[in-house]
Amino acid sequence: MDWLERAARLRQWSRGGTRAPHKPLLLLYALGRFRQDAGGELRYGAVEEDLKRLLAEYGPPHGTTPAYPFHHLVGDGVWEVRTDRGPGSPGSRVGELRASGAAGRLAPELRAALRREPSLLDRMARVLLDQHFPPSLHDELCEAVGLRAEADPASVTPLVAGRRQRDRRMRELVLTAYEYRCAFCGYDGRIGAVPVGLEAAHVRWWAFDGPDDVDNGLCLCSLHHKLFDRGVLGVGDGHRVLVSQRFVGHSDAARDQVTALAGRRLTGPQPGVRPVADDHRAWHAANVFHGTPRPAADTI
């Protein structure tokens, strides 16, 4: 049985490229807990708050519940659920899962495979990360679920046959298009001739069919890349910076580096280069950006 294929092909609700990472997040969490206690079960009532936090931090901006993947992941052959009455899930309602003492764990065949081949766990995690999240979030997500981050996915041989390959030229093309300056703050640091702290960010995530094209990219400093992928920052009409009202920061640094960006026009790209395409901006606004944008800083 090819467990990497199973991980890569989890069935998810999908409409127009909408993110629904509920099952991948639960499976990553279960892999992390298996590493800590290979024989343990995850009782829904005990892990519900952990799963809620993961969905709030790494899921889509609209509200969601961990009860849905806890029940439906069974159908993908990697997870099992039992209650106080015996095997089988009672359904996808929170009350049913709590009242029945529902507990889940990795499917028996998968647990056996992980014991035979311990490296399989990290390879499954890598597939889930690559398929559903941008690289800027991989390290912190691994830490959040109790896994160790592995090598940069761009340098890893594809683990599942037929998977789309990244275009390694994208970084240089995007940084050149934006003249090696952060599109949000203008940062342009170098050591000698080498730029430092500048990255090529996908607007529509590569994991969600975002192309490796300049009009789907932004040159961002490391800080603003992370905040962009976490939904704190976005790009609005007129290619102006959006800042979420959910972001809270009271220091001068938080004000200068984040809230003061609200309404600021992007720096770049240089003339003759296509700016971020409207459909990619719209995908990010619907699937990543959290909450309502703040008013432009100069109107407050």
Image: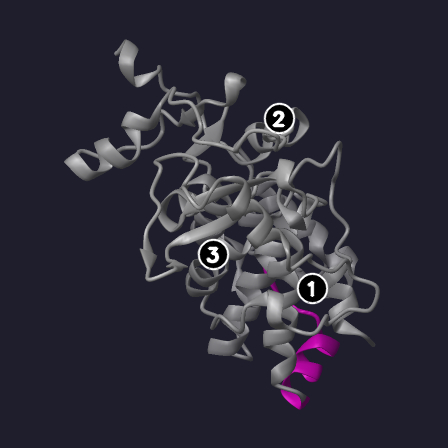
Applied colour scheme: one colour
Between the C-alphas of marks 3 and 1, the distance is 15 Å
Is residue 102 visible in the rendered image? The answer is: no
Between the C-alphas of marks 2 and 3, the distance is 34 Å
Identify the mark at residue 80; answer none if there is no mark: 1
Q: Main secondary structure of the magenta part?
A: helix
Residue 2 at what x, y percent from top left? 80, 74
- Magenta segment: 102-116
**Residue ID for mark 3:** 47
Q: Amino acid at mark 2?
A: Ala
Is 186 part of what is drawn in magenta?
A: no
Q: State the SS at label 2.
A: helix
Viewer-nearest residue: 73 or 140 = 140
Q: State the SS at label 3.
A: helix
Callouts 2 and 3 close, C-beta under 8 Å: no
Question: Which tag, 3 or 1, sits closer to the chain's start?
Answer: 3
Label 2 vs label 3, nearer the camera: 2
**Residue ID for mark 2:** 282
> Could you say which quadrant of the image residue 245 lies in?
top left
Q: State the SS at label 1.
A: strand
Residue 120 at what x, y percent from top left? 65, 79
- Crowd tier of the residue under label 3, counting other residues whose Cα lies within 10 Å: few below 14, some 14–19, many 20 or above: few
Residue 35 in the image: above or below residue 287: below
Residue 3 in the image: above or below residue 206: below
Callouts 3 and 1 close, C-beta under 8 Å: no
Residue that appears at 58% across and 39% down: 203
Q: Amino acid at mark 3?
A: Val
Residue 286 at what x, y percent from top left? 59, 28
Q: Amino acid at mark 1?
A: Glu
